[in-house]
Image: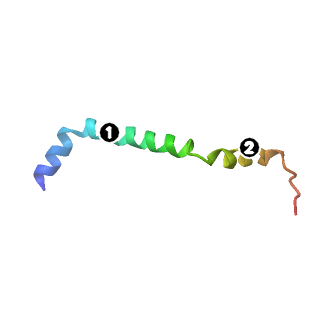
Amino acid sequence: MGAILDFLAAHAGVIGIIFFFTFFCLVTLWTFRPGAGAVYRKYAQLPLEEENKE
């Protein structure tokens, strides 16, 4: 267990960069995935809809 912690401590910077770069890529792919445009257009129209729509 100590060897693993030593490895993580020695390479924490690189591991962090890889983690956040991967997270950034996944969020970017999720945002620009096919079919997402229709959802975003619907969300863009929410403030313009009537408030008392019952």
Quick check: 43 left or right of 4? right
Seen from the viewer's position, the closer of residues 43 and 39 is 39
**Residue 33 placed where, x, y %?**
55, 45
Residue at position x 32%, y 39% from top?
18
Tell me the quarter of the image containing the N terminus. Answer: bottom left
**Residue 47 placed where, x, y %?**
79, 45
Residue at position x 83%, y 45% from top?
48
Quick check: 18 left or right of 48? left
Mark 2 surroundings within 10 Å by alpha-carbon count, few (fewer than 14), some (14 through 19), many (20 or more): few
Image quadrant assignment for residue 19: top left
What distance separates the C-alpha of mark 2 from that of mark 1? 33 Å
Residue at position x 88%, y 64% from top?
54
Q: Earlier in the sequence, mark 2 or mark 1?
A: 1
Q: Amino acid at mark 2?
A: Ala
Image quadrant assignment for residue 25: top left
**Residue 5 placed where, x, y %?**
17, 49
Q: Residue furthest left?
A: 3
Image quadrant assignment for residue 53: bottom right
Residue under numbered circle 2: 44
Q: Residue furthest front?
A: 34
Given contact means CB atoms under 8 Å apart, are the residues at marks 2 and 1 in contact?
no
Q: Amino acid at mark 1?
A: Ile
Residue under numbered circle 1: 18
Q: Secondary structure at mark 1?
A: helix
Mark linked to residue 39: none
Quick check: 46 left or right of 31? right
Q: How many marks?
A: 2
Q: Secondary structure at mark 2?
A: helix
